[in-house]
Image (cartoon, rainbow, N blue to C red):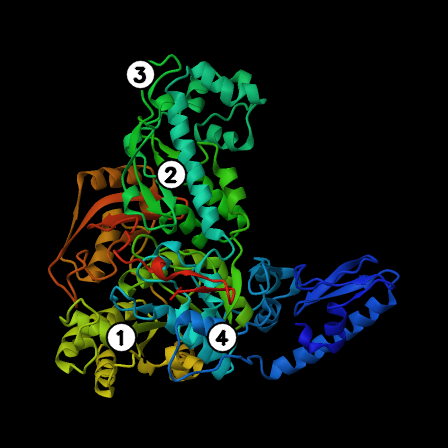
């Protein structure tokens, strides 16, 4: 920041004890501090303007800062993007590209995006939390164009969907000079250290610093892990204490000894229909029993513990095996031991992650967390987080995580990073609040580009049918990312991506595989949006292969099909894609098109599941006895009006990862249904999908280390 002002550069690195001046801007959160005392009255571009007491030099510095910032703002209005990246013909590793870039101070990115100083909370120099109040300030603004980037069913290596998302935004902003903000998910540590790697994009189209992005970022995923496991502990603790205490003792320890009902307990009283009093002494013995004894049926518990690591050995565990959980204080075996079979999920599959992604404000977050269902009582009543007294504590753990994180791309376009649910085992989209903020910031003629996880059959479908229902934001255009490599695999090529078929032209195999892309194009068109296919170019692709994919896309009904080389050339490599997006968004509005959902919420749970499975091409749907029982219970509880979230493999349209292309006549088996009532959908777990991925023989963490000589992280892709 201070390179824009010689005066500030001099003052910021000096200490003038006579005048009482001591300034360390970068060590104190981009604040200028003066020992003479003063108060901050505003921040712009990382320079804190201060109204000092008894310090003429500070007043001079303040004037210099104001003048230099005005000059910078004037110049930035003409050319906002001045990237420092140097494009090389031989593209280095992702981390090498990231470390070659000098990011702008995050306050400068905020200025580009239109975020005011009081709406920005820096976390170091390269990222910042963003206030949800931006939406209130800009409530009179019309929303910008809304674009979702999806893909075909991928290979295990991924097809560059995140890279394409970043690339088209760099094209829109840095090349086409459009107002644009990217909204993407925070990556999980699991695949980062496993097989697939991170989600920052790649090559010259990525979020920087990629090390920051792919690791802890601002701690949102850790907050979710803590909140999820607090609730899990509360469940088993409650079962344990209820098994050892009388109704009277339980009520006394919960309520009387603590001075009465706390606010979260009032919620449970209302649920039970106990509204005549909030005085504990006036409840009948039966009312006290109903209040204090949740009587959770362990066999119905759907709330699992989580961790943000691929650890297959925690998929099924036995808990409560300690001597105090198995035996009474006298050493005798308990009549009702606390031991039970339990499971772990990966953190991004937690309902709390989905709640974060689908909430609209802090009060809504608190309400959603409180109504999360963890199981049922032995009488069939649903048990919620608020029943366990946990909802408020969960909200406290999540209160900072609700704010999106601002970062930047290689070419200095703004990025909002928020939430990170997987698309195969969750709903697979970044947060509603990030999209709402971006749509207001870019304004009517700007562009908010977001990404839906994995193939369009799961990520895009959930974006449309779940996220857009709750956000009330209507998308105009879908980008379907395809690669020659993946389409060859769908045409019958070897699963070994090092096979020579992927390095040589093979139009016969490719012709057999383009049907997978065509299926996704037709699926997207059903929602009423414009569709462009982006052929993400690999160095081994031939012109004939690329042209075949483009032609097949148009034959399937795509409104446009273009090749994109953003991995190697950044925004310039995706300029044609950016132009196609601009054109199609304009056409969507000019034609006054309407966005459509795949199914109405009024139909039954099984009819909704059938509608989604039919979109895959399934012939029938089967249910286990457990799934049938769960569906009946959720219907009786009034949850049949929720959308469905299918958890299945990302590698095939079916639930069998080995079935490539467009399989037909297959059956989808729903083995379990979980009610994510707080998030607002029902999770249907299909086939053999795992809620915690495993690690391969050679995980990615082998290559990750510290370079002490250069003070850098190495090996992170």
Q: Residue 366 in the image: state x and y as whole percent.
A: 50, 44
- Secondary structure under badge 4? helix
- Secondary structure under badge 3? loop
Q: Would you say the residues marked 1 and 3 are in contact, meaning their CB atoms lie under 8 Å apart?
A: no
- Secondary structure under badge 1? loop
Report the quarter where the N terminus lies: bottom right
Q: Residue at x 27, y 48 (%)?
A: 684
Q: Residue 491 in the image: state x and y as whole percent.
A: 15, 72
The residue to which callout 4 is attached is 100
Which tag, 2 or 3, sits closer to the chain's start? 3
The answer to whether residue 583 is seen in the rendering is: no
Q: Which label sits on residue 333?
A: 3
Whole-number angstrom distance, CA of label 2 to CA of label 4: 47 Å
Q: Residue 301 in the image: state x and y as whole percent.
A: 32, 35
Disc 1: CA contacts within 10 A as few (<14), some (14-19) or many (>=20): many
Which tag, 1 or 4, sits closer to the chain's start? 4
User: Residue reaching furthest bottom?
Assistant: 543
Residue 542's image quarter? Answer: bottom left
Taking the image as shown, residue 347 lies to the left or right of residue 112, namely left
């Amino acid at each position: 920041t201070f390179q824009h002002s010689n005066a500030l550069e001099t003052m910021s690195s000096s200490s003038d004890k006579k005048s009482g001046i001591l300034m360390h801007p970068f060590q104190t959160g981009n604040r200028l501090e003066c020992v003479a005392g003063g108060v901050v009255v505003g921040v712009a571009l990382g320079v804190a303007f201060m109204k000092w007491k008894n310090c003429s030099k500070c007043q001079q510095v303040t004037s210099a800062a104001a003048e230099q910032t005005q000059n910078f703002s004037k110049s930035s209005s003409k050319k906002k993007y001045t990237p420092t990246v140097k494009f090389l013909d031989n593209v280095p590793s992702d981390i090498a590209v990231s470390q070659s870039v000098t990011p702008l101070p995050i306050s400068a990115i905020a200025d580009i995006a239109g975020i005011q100083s009081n709406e920005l909370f820096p976390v170091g120099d390269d990222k910042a939390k963003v206030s949800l109040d931006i939406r209130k300030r800009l409530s009179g603004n019309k929303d910008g164009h809304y674009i979702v980037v999806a893909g075909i069913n991928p290979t295990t290596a991924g097809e560059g969907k995140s890279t394409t998302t970043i690339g088209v935004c760099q094209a829109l902003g840095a090349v086409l000079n459009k107002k644009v903000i990217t909204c993407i998910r925070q990556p999980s540590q699991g695949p980062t250290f496993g097989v697939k790697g991170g989600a920052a994009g790649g090559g010259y189209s990525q979020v920087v610093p990629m090390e920051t992005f792919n690791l802890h970022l601002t701690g949102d995923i850790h907050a979710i892990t803590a909140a999820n496991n607090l609730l899990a502990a509360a469940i088993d603790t409650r079962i344990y204490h209820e098994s050892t205490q009388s109704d009277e003792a339980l009520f006394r320890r919960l309520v009387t000894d603590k001075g009465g009902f706390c606010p979260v307990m009032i919620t449970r009283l209302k649920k039970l229909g106990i509204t005549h009093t909030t005085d504990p002494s006036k409840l009948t013995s039966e009312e006290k029993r109903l209040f204090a004894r949740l009587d959770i049926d362990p066999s119905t518990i759907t709330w699992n513990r989580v961790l943000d690591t691929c650890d297959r050995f925690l998929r099924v565990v036995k808990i409560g095996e300690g001597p105090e959980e198995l035996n009474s204080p006298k050493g005798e075996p308990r009549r009702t031991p606390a031991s039970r079979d339990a499971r772990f999920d990966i953190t991004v599959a937690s309902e709390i992650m989905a709640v974060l992604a689908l909430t609209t404000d802090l009060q809504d977050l608190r309400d959603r967390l409180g109504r999360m269902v963890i199981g049922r009582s032995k009488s069939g009543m649903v048990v919620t987080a608020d029943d366990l007294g946990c909802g408020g504590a969960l909200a406290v753990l999540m209160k900072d995580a609700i704010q999106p994180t601002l970062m930047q791309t290689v070419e200095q376009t703004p990025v909002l990073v928020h939430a990170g649910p997987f698309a195969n085992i969750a709903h697979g989209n970044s947060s509603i609040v990030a999209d709402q903020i971006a749509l207001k910031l870019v304004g009517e003629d700007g562009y908010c580009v977001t990404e839906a996880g994995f193939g369009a059959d799961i990520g895009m479908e959930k974006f449309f049918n779940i996220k857009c229902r709750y956000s009330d934001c209507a998308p105009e255009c879908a980008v379907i990312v395809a690669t020659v490599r993946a389409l060859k695999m769908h045409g019958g090529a070897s699963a070994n991506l090092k096979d020579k078929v992927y390095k040589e032209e093979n139009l016969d195999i490719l012709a057999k595989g383009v049907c997978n892309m065509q299926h996704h194009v037709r699926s997207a068109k059903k929602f009423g949006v414009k569709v462009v296919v982006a052929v993400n170019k690999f160095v081994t692709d031939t012109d004939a292969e690329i042209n075949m994919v483009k032609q097949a896309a148009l034959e399937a009904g795509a409104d446009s099909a273009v090749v994109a080389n953003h991995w190697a050339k950044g925004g310039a490599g995706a300029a044609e894609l950016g132009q196609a997006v601009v054109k199609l968004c304009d056409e969507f509005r000019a034609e006054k098109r309407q966005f459509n959902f795949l199914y109405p919420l009024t139909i039954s749970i099984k009819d909704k599941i059938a509608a989604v499975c039919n979109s895959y091409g399934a012939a029938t749907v089967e249910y286990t006895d457990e799934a049938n029982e769960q569906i009946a219970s959720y219907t009786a509880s009034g949850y049949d009006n929720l959308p469905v979230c299918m958890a299945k493999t990302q590698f095939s349209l079916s639930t069998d990862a080995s079935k490539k292309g467009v399989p037909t006549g297959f059956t989808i088996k729903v083995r379990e249904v979980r009610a994510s009532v707080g998030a607002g959908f029902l999770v249907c777990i299909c086939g053999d999908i795992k809620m915690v991925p495993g690690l391969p023989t050679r995980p990615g963490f082998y290559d990750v280390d510290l370079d002490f000589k250069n003070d850098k992280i190495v090996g992170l892709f």
